[in-house]
Amino acid sequence: MVGNFISEFETVTEYWSPKVVAQVNDQYVKVAKVKGDLAWHKHDGEDELFYIVKGNLTIEYENNSLKLNQGDFHVVPKGVMHNLVADEECWIVLTEPVSTKHTGDIVTEKTKSIADQLVS
Amino acid sequence: MVGNFISEFETVTEYWSPKVVAQVNDQYVKVAKVKGDLAWHKHDGEDELFYIVKGNLTIEYENNSLKLNQGDFHVVPKGVMHNLVADEECWIVLTEPVSTKHTGDIVTEKTKSIADQLVS
């Protein structure tokens, strides 16, 4: 199967609703459209890679924040509290373990289960 | 650290010489410029994800081949013989385990060690 990131983004209609588009070994690759802010959370044993396909994303840490622009990537290290903020719509590709929970151990109205993320 | 794929590609001067640009859990993310063909090989226990940033790449399998264009991605499954062919220069992002050998158990003049791929 050949996938295409832009085609996958075109199927996404809801913000903060990651969609699994590939599995490579023990990690999923996901696409998500985001706008607004998610929730402060962490993933105790799991790094999370963010790649910005369109727009800008701010990754807030407790003591600083990083602004990611189109084409940028960044790995949020395991165990570190973080939040995601996008003033305008932003398209991101994520790589993270198949076990990674959307908002860690926090549950909000935005939280999606892994089953939600596997819906094609 | 915020990375940028285009900036990383600008540092690559040799074909078939993957450069590690990030680690997410037990997998590396690498950039590579390729032109020509690599070598028939497989990775017994390791899937390999290819994402095409620029150009076109043909992934040859023993019974078929796939043409990947800009923006496309594909996972070569573990244990499956494959070869890579690019008629013109192609820029690819790879995601694969930190243990994955460049050309599997085959060694050719193009083969790069993992140490080679970690040189910044």
Image: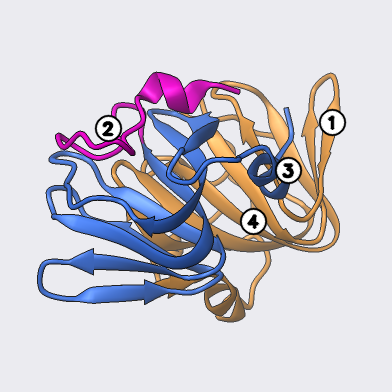
Chain colours: A blue, B orange
Q: Which residue is mark 1?
A: B65
Query: Tag 4: Cα neighbours inside 10 Å, few (<14), some, or many (≥20)?
Result: few
| SS type, badge 2 | loop
Do discs 2 and 4 belong to a common subunit?
no
What is the three-letter code of the residue carrying label 3? Answer: Ser
What is the three-letter code of the residue carrying label 4? Answer: Glu
Disc 2 and disc 4 in contact, CB within 8 angstroms? no
**What is the distance, in whole Å, between disc 4 and disc 1 at their CAs?**
24 Å
Q: Residue at x 84, y 19 (%)?
A: B63
What is the three-letter code of the residue carrying label 2? Answer: Lys
Task: Tell me which chain the residue with mark 2 is part of.
Answer: A
Q: Residue at x 64, y 72 (%)?
A: B14
Q: Which residues are magenta?
A: A97-120
**What is the distance, in whole Å, between disc 3 and disc 1 at their CAs?**
21 Å
Figure check: B46 above or below A91? above
Residue A101 numbered mark, or none? 2
Q: Which residue is mark 3?
A: A7
Q: Is residue A111 visible?
A: yes
Task: Tell me which chain the residue with mark 1 is part of.
Answer: B
Disc 1 and disc 2 in contact, CB within 8 angstroms? no
A94 displayed left or right of A83: right
A50 displayed left or right of B74: left
Q: Is residue B66 within the magenta segment?
A: no
Q: Residue at x 50, y 57 (%)?
A: B30
Disc 3 and disc 1 in contact, CB within 8 angstroms? no
